[in-house]
Image (tube, coloured by chain):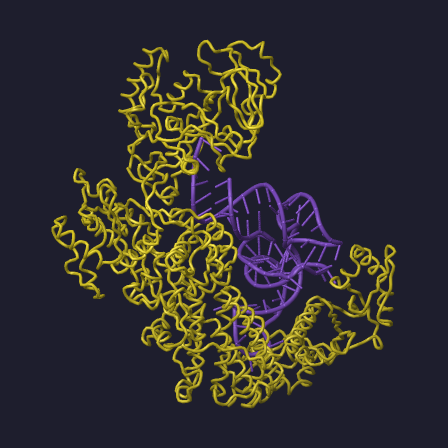
Amino acid sequence: MKKYPEYKKLELPRISNDILNYWKENNTFQKTISSREGATPWVFYEGPPSANGMPGIHHVMARAIKDIFCRFKTLQGYQVKRKAGWDTHGLPIELAVEKSLGITKEDIGNKNSSKYISVEDYNKACRKEVMKYTDQWEQVTAQMGYWVDMSDPYITYDNKYIESVWWLLKDLYNKDLLYKGFTIQPYSPAAGTGLSSAELNQPGCYRDVKDRTATVMFRVVDSLKFKVESSELKVESDEIYFLAWTTTPWTLPSNTALAVGKDIDYVAVKTFHPHPVKGKETEPVVLILAKDLLSKYFPAKNAELKFEEYKAGDKNSPYTVVGEFKGSQLAGSTYQQLLPFVQPDGKAFEVVCGDFVTTTDGTGIVHIAPSFGADDFKVARENGIASLTLVDRRGKFLPEVQDGTFLFGEEFVKEAYLNDAEKQTEFEKQKQILEAAGKIKELKAYLSVDERIVLKLQEEGKLFKKETYEHSYPHCWRTDKPVLYYPLDSWFVKVAQNRSKLVELNQQINWKPESTGTGRFGEWLKNALDWNLSRSRFWGIPLPIWTSEDKSEQLIIGSAEELKQHISNSVAKGFMTGNPLEQFVPGNFSKDNYGSFDLHKPYADNIVLEKNGKKLFREPDLIDVWFDSGSMPYAQVHYPFENKELIDGRKNYPADFIAEGVDQTRGWFYTLHVIGALCFDSIAYKNVVSNGLVLDKNGNKMSKSRGNAVDPFKTIDKYGADATRWYMIANAAPWENLKFNEEGIEEVQRKLFGTLYNTYGFYALYANVDNFVIDEQNILPVSERIELDRWIISELQTLIENVTNAYETFEPHRAARFIEDFVDEHLSNWYVRLSRRRFWRGEMSTDKKAAYETLHECLMVVTQLMSPIAPFFSEWMYQNLTALIRAEAVANNSPLRWDSLHLTNLVKADKTKQDKALEERMELAQKVSSMVLSIRKKENLRVRQPLQRIQIPTLDAEFSMKIEAVKDIILSEVNVKQIDLVDESHTQIVKNLKLNFKTLGKKCGPNMKAVQAYALENAAELIKIIEKEGRYVLNINNAEIVLETEDVEIIPVDIPGWKVANSGAITVALDINISEELKNEGLAREVVNRIQNLRKDSGFEVTDRILVKIKQNSQLDNAIKNNLSYICSETLTNDLQLVQELSTANAVSIEVDELISTLISIEKQN
RNA sequence: UGAGAUAUAGCUCAAUGGUCAGAGCAGAUGCCUUAUACGUAUCCGGUUACAGGUUCAAGCCCUGUUAUCUCAACCA
């Protein structure tokens, strides 16, 4: 006999393990792809993780999202291939290697170092390091149920992958989208390397430091000619100065411009020089600064001081504003070079406009040293201003920056770069010179470059004010020293000039959430800057560009074949001795062939090429690893060397779907978009879900150092993958941050999975008793089933619609919530509860069969709908529900023929089975039942006590019909004998009036409030007249307003003398009088309950028939006698005897209610 | 500093501009009417972050502020 499997308890982790094995044995994942051969592909790209770090719980979250839609689309019949990938290059890997080998960057390839390591060995170590946690990644992938093909992943260090990347770079180069330029980048002189923003953002890198700042006076050239368009200064002095503030005085020798804001108001102020040179103490000067900042430098009260009364050395100087103008009027003025150590080559010392200028601090005029600030560089370039770079890469001034007294030449510009001994030597030197020159009486400590420049300026009468200023400044994470911003050579992709294309293509992308696409991403695109590809590192893809020393010749290599040819040529010309690609056979795409060489450093650097007789050397940089991952659509298929058609024929491109963390917006999402747009004039993905972060339960970021990181392995072991995934998906929208709380998983476990497990258990228990097995070929049409069945089937169709729609719009949390609600509210707490008797009562019948079939269908559909989120449990359910009939299904080629749920086809909602009116009626029944129960609760009447009747006042026929249709359900649910639908002809009903604001709002406008007040006051009269005449006319503020039937809702609220509950437009009254008969019936039900408990405690089967003996009790006997057949049929009792005595040995004492107790015994009868 | 997101009950989340802002969890109080105490019912719980504005009507629309998060930047 075929039996449904029954279980003792729900063990989700065990189910996961069993199903994992089942999938493995049956190659289920492969089948989901092979079974859809020829179907429309649905293209998914896997963003490559880096295997040099352990997987965390956030990876489970991100991968669950990816998995859900791939599974969903598979169910819909698409073929969804999922190629895994590994991101293998980049700084984190270099750092990890250096840490494990105990070396630093200085040791790499440096034979003078005691910890020397060759670039070659270093490269090998990186290769190994990068795959360190591959096992853990594979494990977590399998255990969480993420289906991705890890057998043939793309690996970014693979030669084939690199070859595709080179091809893309060459494509950009040929389209004139790649150029070499220089930018100002964070640079660590101590480490001799540029730093990425990621490095600067490491914890502890930004530190508060105190710097010497100076407000400096730049003297206007030929002040008598100084005119500013409309306003001419009436200057009594020929000394006019721009005031500018700096926190880095060491950049002042490199100053070549000043920046003003074009719409900022500036003033010229006449005052006395605060630090004048000798002999000029009482000669006034004119200073220019932002109007908003005037009061910061000139206290208002000083404006009243008289110039005539000023004496040299007075603390407060008089001042007066002598001119006012916009920044745009100042632009173009020139000034004298502040510290003329070196002359710039080109235009300089001019005032320009910069949009970054503000008046929040400083003077509203910004000192510009184009070499040492990104904004400075930009504004200088825009205005054709030359630059001065008077600091070298070691962080030292050039020798030319030499002052006899205050030193500078060949000096570190930052105090932090000196060690203690150096500082001491410098100090002694300074002491001697400064004291000898009489500049300082007794020098007590080392003076920084900044301090001495300020001193020099002061002495030269160019200083207005000096202060110390505390601000946060970036430090190199490795050397702990402050960074400089320094101009470095770099290769760039021309993104800025293609902004409009990027923005336009972005319109085609469906972003979830939309705001990330239009906002964070869209805004970013609008302002996109050229992409700096260069990285001076060791482990990454080398730039395939070779240049001659005189820069006249250049070659870019786009394939291994090309490289081989060029090397051969170079060998022929005698520039190289051998060809590292000797073994490589172009056109042979085997792994061996591509394993015969290495394109990484140092090999790439050893290649010297030839063009027009000149030696070409490789541009030393590596490319940004983001370019690696952004190349993934093409490089994963080795485009264009292989699979050309997949991309060019748009077969595997662009992706239908990608998903990663929102932190990838300017990472992977961006680089995919840029490369797609520039190389292929296409979007790279159609739909993108940017998911939020996983935080700890208090909303803090998870990190190892905080100890609040959640171990995905432990979590999955404890709760199983399904509960973990379900919790993460259902709890928050993917793009919102998730506060991860284990209690939430527990809740999902008992609420959803526990309920479904129990529902299945119920089905299996009775189906096995009845020897019922579902038969796909012989199902009772839904139209022939009872109202309750038709209702749940109708709700099920609505569920299918809602869930499918939620998945289609990439809103898995909504899908999960719909399923939860259905399972809990509709299926378990209403359908099954109300249907219980149909399952256990009597022999097999049409109605019983319908009940089984209905429940089976509900479980099947729910199982399928939830399977993208909970792949293991749903598979387990599917097997439980269908394994019995698999053989027949295969023979009949019916929908259940598949040996895995994940191979089936998604059900579609059947509109003919949907009955919205029925759904509404049932909702009404639930509402009325709940109201009756709430009255019972208030009146302290337990549900087992039958009551005589409910009255429901009705005002229209439609409502009456609805109640009539669900009357029986309500009565049995609340244990009441009858429902009386009453109207005014029978009962006095208190009614109330509700205004329909939607219709009335238009009608009344500003009089709305008055109408409401009036209606409230005159409710009774209004109701009377509207019921009689269908309209009511009232005058408010001289306006005539006609209330019509549609403008008001009349609802019954009370029946005087009854216990009443109301909710919305429904009112229910309950008769709480208990007659003798009802009392007895209630007692009988109590007895039934006690007997059922005894049956259960005695371990009887649900089908066993019994003999019951009850000790007589005058308060109980009548109740039993009058309800004998009821008691017997409910409890499967053959014979119930009321006896005088019962030995306590075989009997149990029971309390029927607070007052009545007796003895009872039961025994099995066969 | 810029761009973006978020802010609703103790917690996690809902709520086409419309009447009384809802669920689940937690808490309190009951209830085991042959699936389930991993259950179930009832109750308690709100200045919808703050301040303005638009509107007959605002949790929702607009402006500003604050806090938190992400990314980018930190430049005088």
Picture quarter containing residue A1034?
bottom right
Q: Percent position (x, y) of residue A554? A: 25, 48
Residue A735 versus residue A637: which sits nearer the camera? A637
Q: Colour of chain B?
A: purple
A1152 relative to A106 in the view: left or right:
right
Q: Percent position (x, y) of residue A105? A: 25, 42
Q: Is residue A983 above or below residue A699?
A: below
Residue A933 versus residue A649: which sits nearer the camera? A649
Residue A63 versus residue A607: which sits nearer the camera? A607
Q: How many marks?
A: 0
A273 relative to A404 in the view: left or right:
right
Q: Percent position (x, y) of residue A637? A: 31, 64
Quadrant for the N terminus of chain A, please: bottom left
Residue A979 visible in the current orientation: yes
Residue plotted at (31% across, 39% down): A478
A983 relative to A633 in the view: left or right:
right
Residue A1090 versus residue A122: which sits nearer the camera? A122
Q: Percent position (x, y) of residue A65? A: 44, 63
Residue plotted at (40% across, 67% down): A43
Q: Is residue A904 above or below residue A441?
A: below
Q: Is residue A1108 above or below residue A808?
A: below
Q: Colour of chain A?
A: yellow
A1065 relative to A886 in the view: left or right:
right
Residue A359 visible in the current orientation: no
